[in-house]
Image: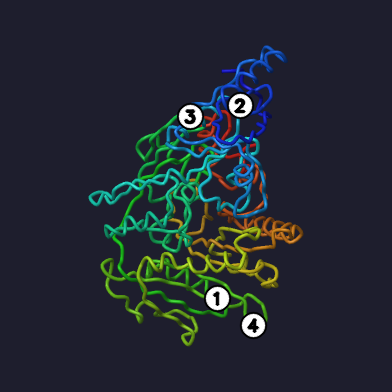
């Protein structure tokens, strides 16, 4: 190995057709592809500086290390289309061994590394300027469902839609899903994985029994609540700061065959949130969330509470009278429908298809995702929503409220307020990709809203687009900060993992 270059080292990609990258020249800061180029680069480096003559050979890989322009450009973009940090290489692993080898290689040379699942981050979280992006999509294996322990072990690149289909074949299901199923398991476990079921069963990170990870030092480790528990706690909702998830064992529960879905309309934000609070405290429904829509004048004053009751074999047939007792919605507008369980889980599929057809999927997405304290949620939400119009948030925008019970969220790094009920408040906005003024305006709005919520004792759910400093992150993690910082020093001592989050200076 050559001497270790400084952290400022930036690799220069080399486009090679039909050739494997075999070495990295620390003098020219470039990849050498084929043995002939390796020898030429070595001779050139030797004549320029004997201290840099040796090349760092790339480990033998089962997969592919990509340096072509197309791959680098794709890895420098994400669903947000706002941040563009270009890596020097992209690893398409053929095995977990490849991830171990390349993380170890990057650690030796102090090169930043970021895993990328489906690229659904909106603010550069899975990008690595001048470093290595690891595509986890090839690590998508789904093991046999263990019906005795009610678990399944899956690769980090597996999509939740595939996991659901595999487990439903055995009458089981993960207990909680994000509304969009085409996200990777490793991706959502890195941030938390919240859905409308979380008030009853916790987030996705609260339903993991074991992980296999690659630490920033390139160590392949299995961890669980009883085995390397400090690492286990630092990885779940740890935003990739200590290790790359390559495999997860998930808890399963019996799955319903059908569900009954209720959509209840409210004209008042405070009443809407109060009824959500009642429902989650009483655990009347298996799934509770809500949306805010614009009225005929364009003001966001229509509040729709969405609640779902699971039917047999999980429970008895839903009783409408008992489930809706005491709620203050407009009964004339209530919609009640029965549907198969998987159809409910995948209900966004036609919406996403329409967005792609309309071109909205390719818009910039400066999302706002906040955790509001229950006691001030109505006031804080109103401050953001008052005066907001559909033109402000762009086409296809969605505004959501998820009520969460703090006692169900047990993962230390998944931060909420100290209130017993918090609300995940999302404004999933969109802007034309070339409208930088609109994007900048929305980012400023996001930052202002975050400051108000943080001052009131709330925080944010870190999947959005809020410009934050390391000091903001320390405040965000609060009492969990010391544990994360200690784990970072232990498991990623050279600080190479996931710089796009901007957590550590």
Q: In terms of depth relative to the viewer, which is nearer, 422 or 139?
A: 139
Residue matched to label 4: 296
Q: Nearer the viewer, residue 315 or 101?
A: 101
Where residue 433 appears, as percent x and y from the top left, is: 69, 59
Please provide percent x and percent y for residue 388. 68, 71
Q: In which quarter of the image is the C terminus?
A: top right
Instruction: Say which label, 4 or 3, has the lower sequence index.
Output: 3
**In the image, farthest residue toward the bottom:** 332
Q: Image height check: is 369 above or below 98? A: below
Question: Which residue carries the number 2 mark?
Answer: 32
Helix, strand or loop under label 2: strand
Question: Which tag is nearer the camera, tag 1 or tag 2?
Answer: 2
Q: In which quarter of the image is residue 380?
A: bottom right
Q: Do the residues labelled 4 and 1 touch (CB within 8 Å)?
A: no
**CA distance separating discs 3 and 2:** 18 Å
Residue shown at 31%/59% (left/top)?
168
Q: Cα distance, mark 1 to mark 2?
A: 58 Å
Label at residue 303:
1
Residue 474 shows up from this direction: no
Tell me which label, 4 or 2, sits earlier in the chain: 2
Q: Are marks 3 and 2 in contact (CB under 8 Å)?
A: no
Residue of label 3 = 101
Q: Which mark, residue 95? A: none
Is residue 392 shown above or below 499?
Answer: below
- Alpha carbon distance from label 4 to label 2: 61 Å
Q: In this view, does 306 lie to the left or right of 210?
A: right
Residue 122 appears at what percent x and percent y? 61, 53
């Amino acid at each position: 190995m050559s001497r270790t270059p400084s952290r400022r080292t930036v690799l220069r990609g080399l486009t090679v057709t039909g050739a494997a990258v075999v070495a990295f020249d620390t003098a020219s800061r470039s990849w050498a592809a084929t043995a002939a180029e390796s020898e030429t680069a070595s001779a050139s480096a030797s004549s320029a500086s004997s201290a840099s003559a040796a090349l760092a050979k790339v480990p033998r890989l089962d997969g592919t290390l990509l340096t072509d322009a197309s791959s680098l450009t794709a890895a420098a973009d994400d669903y947000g289309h706002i941040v563009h940090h270009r890596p020097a290489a992209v690893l398409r692993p053929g095995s977990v061994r490849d991830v171990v080898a390349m993380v170890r290689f990057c650690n030796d040379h102090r090169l930043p590394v970021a895993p990328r699942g489906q690229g659904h981050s909106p603010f550069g979280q899975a990008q690595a300027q001048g470093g290595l992006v690891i595509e986890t999509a090839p690590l998508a294996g789904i093991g046999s469902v263990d019906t005795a322990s009610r678990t399944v072990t899956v690769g980090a690149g597996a999509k939740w839609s595939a996991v659901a289909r595999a487990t439903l074949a055995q009458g089981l299901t993960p207990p909680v899903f994000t509304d969009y199923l085409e996200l990777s398991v490793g991706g959502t476990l890195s941030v938390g994985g919240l859905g409308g079921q979380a008030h009853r069963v916790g987030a996705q990170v609260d339903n993991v029994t074991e992980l296999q990870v690659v630490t920033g030092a390139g160590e392949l480790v299995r961890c669980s609540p009883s085995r390397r528990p400090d690492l286990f706690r630092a990885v779940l909702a740890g935003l990739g700061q200590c290790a790359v998830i390559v495999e997860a064992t998930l808890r399963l529960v019996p799955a319903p065959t059908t569900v009954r879905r209720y959509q209840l309309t409210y004209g008042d934000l405070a009443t809407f949130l109060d009824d959500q609070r009642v429902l989650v405290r009483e655990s009347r429904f298996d799934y509770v969330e809500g949306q805010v829509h614009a009225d005929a004048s364009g003001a966001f004053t229509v509040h729709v509470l969405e609640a779902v009751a699971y039917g047999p074999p999980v429970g008895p047939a839903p009783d409408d009278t008992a489930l809706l007792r005491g709620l203050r919605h407009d009964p004339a507008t209530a919609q009640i429908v029965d549907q198969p369980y998987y159809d409910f889980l995948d209900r966004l599929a036609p919406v996403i298809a329409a967005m792609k057809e309309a071109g909205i999927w390719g818009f910039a997405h400066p999302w706002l995702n906040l955790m509001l304290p229950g006691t001030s949620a109505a006031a804080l939400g109103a401050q953001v929503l008052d005066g907001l119009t559909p033109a402000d948030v762009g086409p296809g925008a969605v505004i959501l409220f998820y009520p969460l019970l703090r006692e169900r969220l047990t993962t230390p790094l998944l931060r909420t307020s100290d209130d017993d009920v918090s609300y995940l408040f999302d404004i999933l906005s969109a802007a034309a990709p070339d409208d930088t003024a609109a994007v900048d305006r929305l980012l400023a709005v996001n930052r202002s809203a975050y400051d108000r919520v943080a001052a009131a004792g709330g925080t944010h759910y870190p999947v959005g687009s809020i410009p934050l400093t390391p000091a903001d992150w320390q405040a965000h993690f609060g009492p969990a900060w010391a544990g994360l910082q200690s784990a970072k020093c232990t498991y990623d001592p050279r600080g190479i993992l996931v710089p796009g989050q901007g957590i550590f200076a």
